Amino acid sequence: MDELLIRPMTEPDLPAYKALRDAMLAGHPDAFTSDAETEMQRDLASYRSRLPSGTDSGTLFTLVALIGGRIIGALTCEREARRKVAHMAQLVGMMVSDTHHGRGIGRALLADAISRLQASPELAQVTLSVTASNRAAVGLYERMGFTRYGRLPDAVRLPDGRRLDKDLMLRRLQA
């Protein structure tokens, strides 16, 4: 089996990233706040904002997980430019292809992201939101040092009528 490689996403990765994201949104509507129908119409160029560019896009980095040169997972870290909240980062868009669930890909993406964030002394904490009923994801985040600081009830309303809560989670980066 090919070795897992985790690295920052680059411009040539955008088509594969969009394909993975579209598939994940379509296959797991309860796991994401974005909806598949809208996002599938999104232009590939719009994902350039997920690349670290020195512009005010807010993206610190998007990590991709590759096996055999194929993107099988991704995770984006964002940060606001406003000074009063510049000590916080947010993780968004964690995804691992269905063919690679349960193999530690998500854990490896999180570990790499946390390591990168801890290397920035100006960052003190990282937050994320996760569908509260997604026990596997919540468990992973807890094992990686995140704690729940709140729950947003009725955060997502799906077309089938389901209403989902989001757990709000935090991990301190610096002592």
Image (cartoon, rainbow, N blue to C red):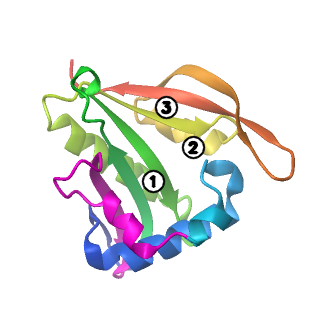
User: Considering depth in this image, is 102 or 8 the residue closer to the camera?
Assistant: 8
Label ID, residue 142 = 3
Q: Residue at x 40, y 42 (%)?
A: 91
Which quadrant of the view contains residue 172?
Answer: top left
Element marked by disc 2: helix
The residue type indicated by label 1 comes to Gly
Q: Which residue is mark 2?
A: 137
* Magenta segment: 42-71
Q: Which residue is mark 1?
A: 106
Q: Residue at x 27, y 74 (%)?
A: 11
Is 55 rendered above or below residue 27?
above
Rounded to the nearest angstrom, the CA distance separating label 2 from label 1 is: 9 Å
User: Considering depth in this image, is 147 or 53 the residue closer to the camera?
Assistant: 53
N-terminal-most mark, 1 or 3: 1
10 Å crowding of disc 3: few (<14), some (14-19), many (20+): some
N-terminal-most mark, 2 or 1: 1
Is 40 rendered above or below residue 138?
below
Horizontal and vertical percent for residue 95? 50, 58
Q: Are marks 2 and 1 in contact (CB under 8 Å)?
A: yes
